[in-house]
Image (cartoon, rainbow, N blue to C red):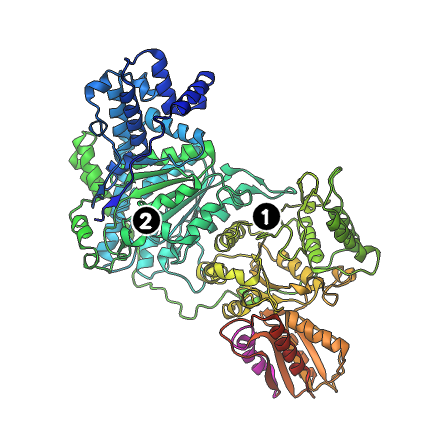
Amino acid sequence: MNKDNLEEAPVRFGANLGYLLEMADQYNHDPASVTEELQALFGVLASGDVKTGDAGKLKSVIQLVDNIRQYGHLKGDIYPLYKREYDHLPKLTLEEFGLTEEDLKALPAKLVSEKLASQFTNAYEAICHLSEVYMGTIGYEMSHINNADERDWLINEIEIAGRQAFSKEDKIKLLKSVAHVEGFEKYIHKNFVGAKRFSIEGVDALVPMLETVLSESSKSDIGNIQIGMAHRGRLNVLTHILEKPYEMMLAEFMHVDPLKFLPEDGSLKISRGWTGDVKYHLGGTKTTTRYGSEQVIELAKNPSHLEIVAPVVLGKTRAVQDATNGNAPEQDINRSLAVLVHGDAAFPGQGINFESMNLSNLDGYKTGGSLHIITNNRVGFTTECWDSRSTNYATDIAKGYDMPIVHVNADDIEACIDVIILAMKFRQTFHHDFVIDLVGYRRYGHNEMDEPSVTNPMMYKEIKTHPSIEILYGKKLVADGVISEEEMNQIFKNVEEELRSAHDSIDKNEKETDAEMAMPEVVAAGQGDVETGVDLAVLEQLNQDMLTYPEGFTPFSKLTKILERRQDPFTKDGLVDWGHAELLAFGTIIQDGKPVRLTGQDSERGTFAQRHAVLSDEKTGEKYTPLKHIQGAQASFDIHNSPLSEAAVVGFDYGYNVQNKNAMTVWEAQYGDFSNMAQMMFDNFISSAHAKWGETSGMTLLLPHAYEGQGPEHSSARLERYLQLAAENNWTVANLTSTSNYFHLLRKQAHYLNTDQMRPLVMMTPKSLLRNTFVSRPIKEFTEGQFRPVITDSYKKTKVKKILIASGKVAIDLYTELQKNPNDEIALIRLEQLYPLPEEALKNMITDLKNAAEIGFVQEEPQNQGAWHYIYPELESLANGKTIKYYGRVKRSSTSEGDNEVHKLVQNAIIQDALTI
């Protein structure tokens, strides 16, 4: 083992007489205004219980107490095996402070703590008690917490309230729980040799801990529990927490259809997609009254990206907590609780955890306190802690977020239950997160086919001889006279017989294989056209409501003039620009009863000052959100500036929409390429969850995208990535050129929410086009019609020699040039929806233009990027003998040139080349 050097505990107070006098004055005025250590010191001095000359001993005693509380965990019995050793530990014993037992017996217990004075007769007894509490199988870390009330509450719970009293029935119940946990793993290991299951063995206590979470939640009327975890132990949690029958789990190992064994009472819901996933990525939903009140327990589906599910679970939790039937969401944190199960290597190693914890106290994302349980195997695949983190504990990263941290020996099952109860009480009291480090081991290798002794021989030398938890706890109960050895063995035998009976009920000859994996008919059918126009009177009243402010509210004067122009489409011949069209769409969507949630960096105003959904009083700073105050709203509008995070925020909002499928959940990137930081969310959840897991989403992504000379990192939203992932009607990918079309597309997206045709929407949104007069449209186009996947202007079909197809800004560049220099030999098709490709509309156009010899596809992106490689084979099948030609940048490793003047030359060359016959 490595030897960590730890600094001596800092002296909290000492030789500074002026400081002590000041603190003494504060104490005399209000004892609660100083720390507990100082309260004890001043209280004892004032009582006259200490002899003259004992001041040095007093200081030593108080610092010893402080050290025990702050560093006792370093000497704690928190490791079941493979103990860690430290050099240069802080002083934690009487001898190290030059104190004797007699010294302490001569001092009152209230010197240690006023609260311990009634339990102990002297300081020696009180310090022995603290040593037992802080240096046992539970280690506490709380000195990093800034909130004094939280620290004092924890000290009181730890030192005064103490450990739980377990009845005989409680202990037998715990033994049966871990017997089922271990029995399941051992049965699989024996009967399906070499099959991957990512065993829970070594941290088996997780299951009874989760059972305790459920029972404690029931006492607080928390009716929904959202659990997120990676693959380690997932099968056991599915089986014993979600009560997935043994028959279902064993059938999956046998490649037999598990749904044959789904409980007929409908209490367990298991969704699956048509392409499927491995068993240790699957989740489910269980409705149960097993723990008292009716509860819904959900285990989120998760890919192999370890911690990536954390923000998804937080979003699901917040969606349950939010009531969205009013003008603004109303959150009740007791509607749902998030429990996140982490790995010890992944918790400090994966940045998504930092991002997710940063959400914990933000208005738009907080969930009233999540429970974090680290299943600490002491190894990540083959890598031990000194190679996987720079901190002493895996939990140290949580200190920056003021979260209490408790380390507990996974072999002390009763201590594990104590810790969970403490965590739940803290959450219900302070509504903050709590971190539990469940310190155990991993019985086998990373998966059951690995031989861990090859890479971790010293660790596994101890593991191979270490008894499993049901044996340890069973023998302890026998030794304590709780049960007999025969009773213990019968419990183990009953578990094995239960599993054998389930196994025998499965016909191994009924193997399930579906090589075709056809998508469901409803998915294949896609989305039909929807009439999305809104009556003019409704739009006019909505617009007026958005321009009406509370009495005394004064928006920024220059902004007021800009916003007042939003009257022009209704009173003059004004046009509706992009930001205006969007707010009109959102307003009508909430009037239709669908809540809207929009988040992103600077989304309240909009990156390009285009939205102004939230206004600030220039005199008071007060915020006002007009869409929360419109007439006729049947659902809430919610908008938040997000933290400077992409992965966690996208994951959160994806989870929110998965849970509340009726909600129009929108995430906006500050610039489209910033979405790079959330790529795993697009790859592993949003684009593929339906096919893998049967998990549906209607999330909307707004990704600013256009080549405008701003350099490689502010030009492309990486359109090609979304098109590469496009298949099986998994999402809509659009790049629009009309504000009315944007209005209709948003309303179409909302229309299909919470239906079988629901799917995500990926929008390449504009920058300079936000206020372009060709893109801005008259209000009449908002009152009738529907979303148009293809937009064309009138043409003389006999004269057309060249068809140009383009999307987004480059399409408007072409359109602008053609407005200046009309050319009847060119027909411009503005392709608004790239996926699913509107093949029929394109085919009809191409067929109609019989004299056209060439189809030119125009894009701004380099040839190896953008839509070209996606659309070329599609155009080939539609070309009907016409030549297909590419117009755009040449192949590049970077998205764009960095110099603005060079950009103008390149961009102009593309446009002129495309318009040349």
Q: Is residue 791 left or right of residue 224?
A: right
**Tag 1: amino acid:** His
Residue at 38% across, 46% down:
397
Above or below 302: residue 786 = below
Judge by depth and name the residue closer to the eye, 99 or 692: 99
Asked if residue 321 can be seen in this view, the reply is: yes
Asked if residue 241 can be seen in this view, the reply is: no
Q: Is residue 524 left or right of residue 844?
A: left
Q: Which mark is residue 236?
A: 2
| Residue furthest to the top | 48
**Tag 2: amino acid:** Asn
How packed is label 1: few (under 14 Cα within 10 Å), some, or many (20 or more)? many
Q: Earlier in the sequence, mark 1 or mark 2?
A: 2
SS at mark 1? strand
Above or below 783: residue 419 = above
| Residue 22 in the image, given as x and y percentages of width and height | 44, 22
Locate the C terminus and report the quarter of the image it occupies: bottom right
Residue at 37% across, 26% down:
16
Quadrant hosting residue 41: top left
Residue at 68% across, 38% down:
620
Q: Which mark is residue 640?
A: 1
Judge by depth and name the residue closer to the eye, 640 or 182: 640
Which stretch is magenta? 863-881
Quadrant hosting residue 6: top left
Mark 1–mark 2 distance (CA, rounded to whole Å): 38 Å
Q: Is residue 103 magenta?
A: no
